[in-house]
Image: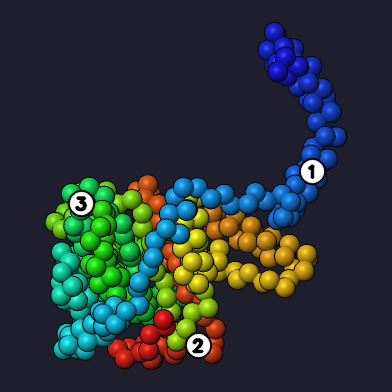
Amino acid sequence: MGLVLSGQGEKGSPLLTLARRYSQYLSYPLLLVGLLWLLALPLDNMARRVYISENALMPGQADTEFGSTSHIQAMSLIDSALLAHEHVKDPSERQAQAVGSVFEGLGLDTQIHRFNYDEVQGVGDHRGINVHGILRAPRSDGVEALLLAASWRTSDNYTNLNAVRLMAGMAKYAQEQVYWAKDIILVVTDAGEIGIEKWLRAYHGQEPGLHVRSGIIQAAVSLDLPPAKKYNGLGLHFEGKTGQLPNLDFINTVQKISLIERMPAYLHGQEDVESEGWWDGYVRAARLLLGQISAQAVGSSVGVHAPFLRYRIDALTLSGITDERNRIDESAGTPGMPYAW
């Protein structure tokens, strides 16, 4: 450090004086070194393997029993409720009332949250409806909660009915877990990130209109499942606005669970290829790196998890990966559409 800053400060530093004198000659080599270093980051030797913390080990100690007949029946309740509310003309109101009735039938504390949003210049007045249900943990005082969220439209503007069905099945599954110590919150919105933002403001008391609450939200998972007969895997998206990211342990835990359940979660939806060569692996890793850099720089995100990160809630989105053979037409995304699991 003495070579960089001498006793006379920056003016007397020999290294800084030398750098200023030859700065025009040093700038180009340093720029080249920086570019080469960036190109070297996708190499396997430069990447630090994801470590396994105590949180990422916990999923291996649990046995999941989701997928029983009762869970499938709970999922079908969404279809029955949508058919029962066909007389409601407004689509958003019909969807909210249908989901609210299912949540109430499953024993959740439920509320429908209507809101207006006119804060973005050029967008205009936006009206939307959120509906949420809270499953109170039998061994908890309501201090902490986990959250599942879904919008009625996916990020690719397909119907997200499969995600809403899955949430109903998860609610039935969570009811059977008498040893859980955190409340489970289910949120369905018809306005994407705007709806989640307005719900979070009301939940934290920044705006009126929400009286059914739980405790501090520890983590949130957004579901983005386009209409499909089968999913080949899950895309894991975690970038928020202004470069915000969730805790790495949360990402590791989700990936570990996905492998255990034989539904692997791929970063940004880029599937792994076992037989790829050295160059193909490098290109795939480079695309993944540049994709994350661009997503953080631009602030683009998939799903509705981004607003949670602004409230210091670890959140990410799981999107379904399918192909044209298993994809279902938008017109088929109505009650009666076959399940994708």
Task: Pinpoint residue 47: horizontal percent, then vertical percent.
Answer: 67, 51
SS state under label 1: helix
Establish if 167 lies above or below 89.
Answer: above
| Quarter assignment of residue 85 | bottom left
Q: Which amino acid type is marked by label 3? A: Ser
Let me know if residue 244 appears in the view: no
- Residue at mark 2: 326
Q: Quadrant of the N terminus?
A: top right
Task: Pinpoint residue 52: horizontal percent, then vertical percent.
Answer: 53, 50
Select label 2 or label 3 by which is in front: 3
Q: Which amino acid type is marked by label 2? A: Asn
Q: Which amino acid type is marked by label 1? A: Val
Foreground of the two, 2 or 314:
314
**With 141 as the anchor, is 226 left or right in this view?**
right
Residue lying at 71% horizontally and 49% vertically, measured from the top left: 46
Q: Earlier in the sequence, mark 2 or mark 1?
A: 1
Task: Pinpoint residue 16: horizontal percent, then vertical percent.
Answer: 76, 22
SS state under label 2: loop
Q: Please say if the residues under marks 1 and 3 sit with CB atoms less than 8 Å apart.
A: no
Q: Earlier in the sequence, mark 2 or mark 3?
A: 3
> How many other residues sit within 10 Å of disc 2, few (<14), some (14-19) or many (≥20)?
some
- Residue at mark 1: 33
- Residue at mark 3: 140
Whole-Å distance between the Cαs marked 1 and 3?
55 Å
Whole-Å distance between the Cαs marked 2 and 3?
41 Å
> How many other residues sit within 10 Å of disc 3, few (<14), some (14-19) or many (≥20)?
some
Q: Quadrant of the C terminus?
A: bottom left
Residue lying at 76% horizontally and 16% vertically, measured from the top left: 3
